Amino acid sequence: MKRHTMNVALSGGLLAVFLLLAGCGEDQGPAEQAGEQIDEAAEDVQESAEEGMESAGDTMEEAADEAEQAADEVEEETD
């Protein structure tokens, strides 16, 4: 959870820097290009983290369902 919060904060900060640099004019200098690349990288990291968390959640749900089914089968056998 801390990583997700850090990624969101990083993305927000980079977005703010990017917006400030974008207001300087239409010609992009090296700092603006670097800012865009950093912003894109931060977004990629955030998306990967969210996908990983979603995948882990799905795996945990499947494991819980399987455990519940196994417990039900054991209960039926003992009745």
Image: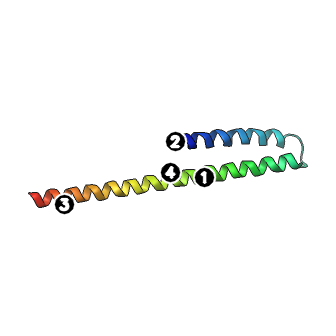
Task: Give the residue at x 54% y 54%.
Answer: 51
**Distance from Cα at disc 3 to Cα at disc 2:** 35 Å
Give SS at disc 2: loop
Which residue sits furthest front? 2
Precedes in sequence: disc 1 or disc 3: 1
| Amino acid of disc 2 | Met
| Residue 33 % position (x, y) | 83, 50
Q: Residue 34, how many percent across, how many down?
A: 81, 49
Q: Nearer the viewer, residue 6 or 47?
A: 6
Amino acid bearing label 3: Glu
**Residue type at tag 4:** Met
| Residue type pointed to by label 1 | Glu
Q: Residue furthest left?
A: 79
Q: Is residue 27 left or right of residue 17?
A: right
Q: CA distance from mark 1 to mark 4?
A: 10 Å
| Alpha carbons under labels 1 and 2: distance apart | 14 Å
Label 2 close to label 4 by CB (< 8 Å) = no
Instruction: Identify residue for label 1.
Output: 47
Q: How is the image coloured?
A: rainbow
Q: Percent position (x, y) of residue 38?
A: 74, 49
Instruction: Check whether the beta carbons of the residues at disc 1 and disc 4 lie within 8 A of each other.
Output: no
Checking the image for residue 53, the label placed there is 4
Q: Within 10 Å of the Cα at label 3, are there few (<14), some (14-19), or many (20+) other Cα atoms?
A: few
Res 1 label: 2
Choose the circle earlier in sequence order: 2 or 4.
2
The image quadrant that residue 22 belongs to is top right
